[in-house]
Each structure stands twice: as C-alpha cells, then as structure tokens.
Image (cartoon, rainbow, N blue to C red):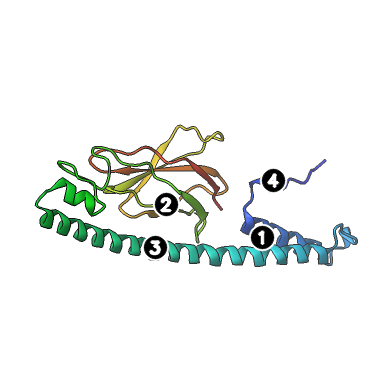
C-alpha cells in the first residue's frame, strides 16, 4: 500500500508554499477527493497568508542588507575621522602621555585600535536564503584589523563538523553558491590578518 510522504520539516517557506499550491491544484475538482479536509479554500487561505509573510520577510531582509551597508560605510567614515584625530593628538602632544590621556586616548609606547597580535571573534553572523536555489547569504559585523574573512560549512546535524572551507572575502558578507538543495548547513566565519581570529558561533540554514 502506498503512503503519502511530505517531509514538511525539511522544507523552507517557499518550498512549503510550492507544496501547498501543488496540493491545491491536485485536489481542486478531483473526483477522487470530493470533500478534502481541510477544504481547498482553507488551504488557499493558509498558503496566501504564508506567501504574504514570506514576501515581507524578503523585503525586510533586503532592507536589512541595505541598512548594514549604510552602517558599515558610516563606521568606516568614523574610523577615518578618529584616526585623523588621533594623529593630530599624537603630533600636537609630542608623545606626552599625560596630554594624550587627557584627550581620552590610550598612551602606550606603540598603540593600536585592536589588541596586538590578535583578532576579535566574528560576531552577529546571520544566514538567509539566497535569491537562487543553492544560495545562502551570510552577513556579520566587521572585525577591527581584519584583512579578510574565511568561511567554512558543515552538514553534520550537530553542527560540530567536520568543517570544510567554502569561501573567503574581504567584505563582511558573502553569497555562497552551488550548495546542495534541501540540505541543512552550518556556517561559521573567522577574521584573518597577520594572525587568524577565533571562529564565530555557528549558524544554520536550509538551502532550497
């Protein structure tokens, strides 16, 4: 005897919507299933509600990316301004530590904006479904002193590895392409420079 298999827990929102639409199309006017429960109209309503919510989610995700781009540009602008102000204080103070401290800056023999020889951990890593099947968009906060970022993924259900390198970028975002569809991936990112930073906490997302 044949048995219906849905595997609904493995589906993301667009896949649920597509599955629902196929079912509605198959049930509507089908003499074999004259009185479906829930009704076709009830199914249509739930599909419509999720479809609208998915569209809102997509818009907000694009807005969030735009806001992050704007914020990162403002961060770069402020960093440049702070660096210029620090250079001014350095030159004007002639290296007098008390004068430097009075300006609200650290006075060291050689000072840095980040701890010498180390890079902070990547934070605020977030994953979202890309525009095309097999794509995942990753975004995270920039790390001071990073020259770039390394990305790796795992498909083990525990998110503990083994990990494989899947990308590198100089930006604080990346679109990973050609991933296998309908698979739950775990992703992590670390900053790289003179030394490597610690890996971020992993995030997980299903591909479509």
Residue 26 in the image, given as x and y percentages of width and height:
77, 61
Label 4 sits on a secondary structure element that is loop
Q: How many marks?
A: 4
Residue 18 is tagged as: 1
Q: Residue at x 17, y 51 (%)?
A: 99
**Mark nearer the N terminus (4 vs 3):** 4
Q: Within the image, what quadrant is residue 200 found in?
A: top left
Q: Residue at x 90, y 60 (%)?
A: 35
Distance, label 2 to label 1, CA atoms, is 31 Å
Q: Which residue matches tag 4?
A: 7
**Labels 4 and 1 touching (C-beta < 8 A):** no
Distance, label 4 to label 1, CA atoms, is 14 Å
Distance, label 2 to label 4, CA atoms, is 31 Å
Residue 108 is tagged as: none
**Mark nearer the N terminus (2 vs 4):** 4
| Horizontal relation, residue 74 to residue 201: left or right | left
**Labels 2 and 1 touching (C-beta < 8 A):** no
Label 2 sits on a secondary structure element that is loop
Residue 6 in the image, given as x and y percentages of width and height:
72, 48
Label 3 sits on a secondary structure element that is helix
Q: Which residue matches tag 3?
A: 71
């Amino acid at each position: 005897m044949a048995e219906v298999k849905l595997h609904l827990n493995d589906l993301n929102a667009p896949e649920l919507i597509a599955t629902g639409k196929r079912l509605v199309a198959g049930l509507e006017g089908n003499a074999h299933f004259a009185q479906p429960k829930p009704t076709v109209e009830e199914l249509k309503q739930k599909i419509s509600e999720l479809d609208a919510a998915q569209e809102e989610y997509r818009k907000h995700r694009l807005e969030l990316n735009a806001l992050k781009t704007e914020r990162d540009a403002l961060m770069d602008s402020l960093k440049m301004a702070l660096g210029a102000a620090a250079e001014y204080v350095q030159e004007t103070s002639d290296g007098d530590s008390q004068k430097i401290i009075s300006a609200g800056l650290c006075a060291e023999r050689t000072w840095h904006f980040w701890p010498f020889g180390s890079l902070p951990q990547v934070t605020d890593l977030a994953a979202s479904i890309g525009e095309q099947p097999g794509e995942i968009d990753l975004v995270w906060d920039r790390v001071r002193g990073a020259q770039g970022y390394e990305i790796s993924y795992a498909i083990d259900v525990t998110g503990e590895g083994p990990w494989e390198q899947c990308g590198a970028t100089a930006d604080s975002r990346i679109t990973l392409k050609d991933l296998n569809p309908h698979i739950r991936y775990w992703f992590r990112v670390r900053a790289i420079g003179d030394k490597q930073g610690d890996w971020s906490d992993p995030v997980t997302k299903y591909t479509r």
